[in-house]
Image (cartoon, grey):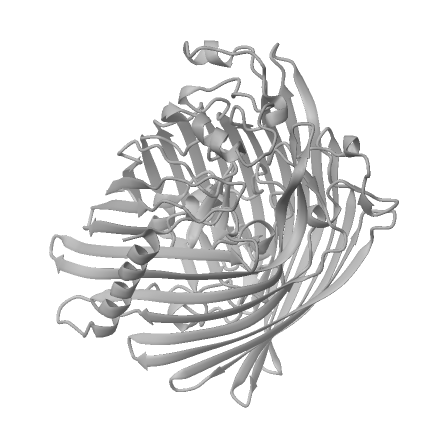
């Protein structure tokens, strides 16, 4: 049985089990009733006609990691595209980068994470109170480019209501896999008429421990075999054993938010600062590889004489947010958000003698504003109308400045309408977006994109529903896709390859294509949910046809450096994902749940074979126990081999992942004290992440245990 068949059997079993499960006497399990703020009408999870992932409360505390991708990777349909331990981007149904929008409190985050796989998001999951993911392209509130979906990190930095009493939480933890120490604290209170929010965190870690060598030299040779001239290929100059060299990191941040609120709404302001200093694993930047050979004689001796690259990031963000509710009139609610972000990171080249040189400096500075109006019912139709504006200035200066300085402006209008009947709910939406990218010279581009969506939610019974969604989304090419290594006076690549600047993270000479057209994605999704009873779960199947899908295609070599050009070709993505939870037992001692989940995605070009770096299929099972004062969860996940690869990438072996979590609660005064432990990769498997550019340079973390204590008042 191959991996696709295996996952298909599992998910079909999920569907059959949910469908035939009747009501049983005894205890029942329910979906969460909390409101989903990322959806247009802010319904709970059972009443929205979109596939949703929500992480909050104890579940988020268990899974939270140092990057968005690492935090979300165990959710169905979501994987982590890592670039060493310091970077993790969310991959949703095989889509990543510019096709997945990262929001902070429902407003786009201004950083440079989508430009290169070695750039971390300017968002800290550790400070989030909840993370919402809307899968699929039906995300008209936020942008036409979100073909894969959106990730909305909500941290409540601007309080929307007053607090009945002061709230305080502090957590301290230690992780053995990298000797990481992490502290996070939050405070909320209402002082007179002023609502106050404070949060802060700090973390630092040493190099990540693994089992075996970091660099898979045999896999590198196989991956390079497609090049015609193999004589120049060299062995990696430095290969750490038992740890990932240069994977240490430190980060900290803090936020201050204030607001005033009453029965009609609120208005507030916040300022947040974030710093993140992390290393890129040894050998990951080809241009920085050192020529000396070293035997494995321990940590200090191995790293001596090597060149490494580190990224030093700083970000300051200012937010103004408000809401006004009306008791009468056509418009019932006005919401607005404006943020201004000043982002900078420097790529530091650490020379063998310890000298630090700034290789490239990336800057992205600007604002984005969103305003929405919710209107009163019109013949049973309710709706949200909105406008979004943005203006940012991007620059990259230094050795890796292969993208020109560019001014970006955007204007969008959108509307979503909802009709609710006795058993059926319809949602229709449209978004028009106008963007202007001006790098100077003759390369200015003005483009318009439009997106349409329609979704249908039908209540089969009181405890289950069927959803169908159809949408068409357009995405304009991004800066790097258009302007990488482009001469501004001609708006064409330089005829002299000597002028081209390599992109060290991908180890490619990337050549943009100013004449690229818009991507157009047509998506069909059918889903089923059962959200009450002893057996709950969901199943979704989707098909996504993307015309003129933009990707990097190998087009040759120049002086031992691979050349890749941005091109467009039609592609098709299709997949299945499902989750089943069986509430097996409830008595005076606690509750026992058994869950089963799996997902798979396939992606093929019309003519060129498989789309590169598509996540492998996986299935998983977990057993969890919840009692009055303690809980425990054991999770086993099987990730299958990935054989569906393009010419320039190698196949990747699967692995088995075993994780264990346990906690104990106790009252302490008016608050609660919690002790927790999380064991990850307990089988100490060598995990090579197929969708990572660094899968052959840096495996995922080895066996580790995270121990912590949290006090909540």
Which residue is outermost to the bottom? 379
Q: Nearer the viewer, residue 349 or 218?
A: 218
Nearer to me, 229 or 217: 229
Residue 105: quadrant of the picture: bottom right
Residue 685: x and y, percent?
31, 33
Q: Examine the rendering and report whether any part of residue 713 can be seen.
A: no
Above or below residue 493? Residue 262 is: below
Residue 618 in the image: above or below residue 450: above
**Residue 231: in sight, yes or no?**
yes
Residue 462, x across and y down, in percent: 29, 79
- Residue lying at 39% horizontally and 56% vertically, measured from the top left: 600
Front residue (pair 686, 530): 686
The image quarter containing residue 375 is: bottom right
Residue at left 43%, top 25%? 214
- Tell how many labels: 0
Relative to 498, is 285 on the left or the right? left
- The residue at the point 38 percent across, 62 percent down is 576
């Amino acid at each position: 049985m191959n991996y696709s068949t295996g996952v298909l059997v599992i998910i079909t079993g999920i569907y059959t089990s949910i469908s035939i499960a009747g009501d049983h006497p005894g205890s029942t399990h329910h979906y969460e009733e909390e409101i989903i703020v990322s959806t247009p009408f802010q319904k709970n999870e059972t009443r929205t006609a979109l596939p949703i992932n929500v992480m909050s409360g104890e579940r988020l505390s268990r899974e939270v990691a140092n990057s968005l991708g690492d935090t979300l990777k165990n959710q169905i349909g979501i994987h982590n595209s890592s670039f060493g331990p310091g970077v993790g981007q969310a991959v949703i149904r095989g889509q990543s980068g510019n096709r997945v929008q990262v929001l902070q409190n429902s407003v786009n985050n201004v950083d440079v994470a989508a430009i290169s796989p070695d750039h971390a998001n300017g968002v800290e999951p550790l400070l989030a109170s909840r993370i919402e993911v809307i899968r699929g392209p039906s995300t008209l509130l936020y942008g036409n480019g979100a073909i894969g979906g959106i990730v909305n990190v909500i941290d409540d930095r601007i309080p929307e209501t007053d607090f009945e009493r002061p709230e305080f939480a502090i957590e301290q933890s230690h992780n053995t896999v990298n000797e990481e120490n992490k502290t996070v604290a939050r405070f909320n209170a209402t002082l007179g008429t002023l609502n106050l929010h404070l949060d802060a965190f700090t973390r630092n870690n040493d190099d990540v421990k693994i089992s075996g060598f970091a660099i898979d030299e045999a896999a590198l040779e196989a991956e390079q075999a497609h090049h015609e001239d193999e004589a120049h290929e060299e062995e990696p100059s430095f290969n750490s054993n038992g740890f990932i060299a240069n994977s240490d990191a430190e980060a900290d941040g803090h936020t201050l938010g204030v607001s005033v609120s009453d029965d009609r709404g609120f208005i507030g302001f916040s300022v947040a600062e974030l710093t993140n200093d992390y290393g890129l694993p040894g050998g990951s930047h080809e241009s920085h590889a050192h020529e000396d050979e070293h035997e494995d004689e321990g940590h200090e001796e191995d790293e001596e004489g090597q060149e490494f690259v580190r990224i030093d990031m700083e970000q300051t963000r200012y937010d103004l947010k408000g809401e006004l509710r009306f008791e009468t009139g056509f418009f019932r609610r006005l919401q607005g958000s404006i943020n201004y972000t000043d982002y900078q990171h420097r790529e530091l080249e650490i020379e063998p003698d310890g000298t630090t040189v700034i290789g490239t400096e990336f800057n992205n500075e600007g604002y984005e504003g969103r305003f929405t109006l919710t209107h009163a019912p019109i013949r049973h139709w309710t709706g949200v109308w909105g406008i979004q504006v943005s203006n940012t200035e991007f620059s990259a200066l230094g050795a890796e400045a292969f993208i020109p300085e560019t001014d970006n402006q955007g204007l969008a209008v959108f509307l979503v309408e909802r009709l609710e009947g006795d058993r059926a709910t319809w949602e229709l939406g449209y978004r028009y977006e106008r963007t202007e990218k001006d790098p100077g010279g003759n390369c200015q581009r003005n483009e318009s994109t439009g997106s349409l969506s329609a979704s249908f939610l039908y209540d089969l019974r009181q405890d289950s529903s069927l959803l169908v969604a159809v949408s068409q989304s357009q995405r304009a090419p991004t800066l790097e896709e258009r302007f990488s290594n482009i001469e501004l006076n001609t708006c064409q690549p330089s005829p002299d390859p000597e002028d081209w600047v390599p992109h060290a993270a991908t180890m490619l000479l990337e050549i943009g294509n100013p004449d690229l057209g818009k991507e157009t994605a047509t998506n069909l999704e059918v889903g089923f949910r059962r959200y009450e009873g002893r057996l709950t779960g969901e199943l979704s199947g989707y098909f996504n046809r993307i015309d003129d899908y933009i990707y990097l295609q190998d087009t040759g070599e120049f002086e031992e450096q691979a050349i890749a050009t941005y091109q467009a070709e039609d592609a098709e993505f299709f997949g299945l994902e499902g989750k089943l939870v069986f509430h097996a037992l409830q008595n005076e001692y606690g509750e026992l749940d058994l869950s089963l989940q799996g997902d798979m995605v396939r992606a093929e070009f019309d003519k060129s074979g498989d789309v590169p770096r598509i996540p492998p299929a996986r299935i998983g099972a977990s057993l969890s126990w919840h009692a009055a004062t303690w809980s425990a969860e054991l999770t086993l996940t099987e990730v299958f081999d990935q054989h569906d690869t393009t010419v320039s990438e190698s196949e990747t072996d699967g692995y088995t992942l075993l994780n264990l979590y346990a906690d104990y609660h106790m009252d302490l005064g008016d608050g609660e004290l919690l002790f927790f432990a999380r064991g990850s990769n307990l089988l100490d498997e060598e995990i090579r992440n197929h969708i990572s550019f660094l899968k052959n340079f840096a495996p995922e973390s080895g066996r580790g245990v995270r121990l912590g204590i949290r006090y909540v008042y």
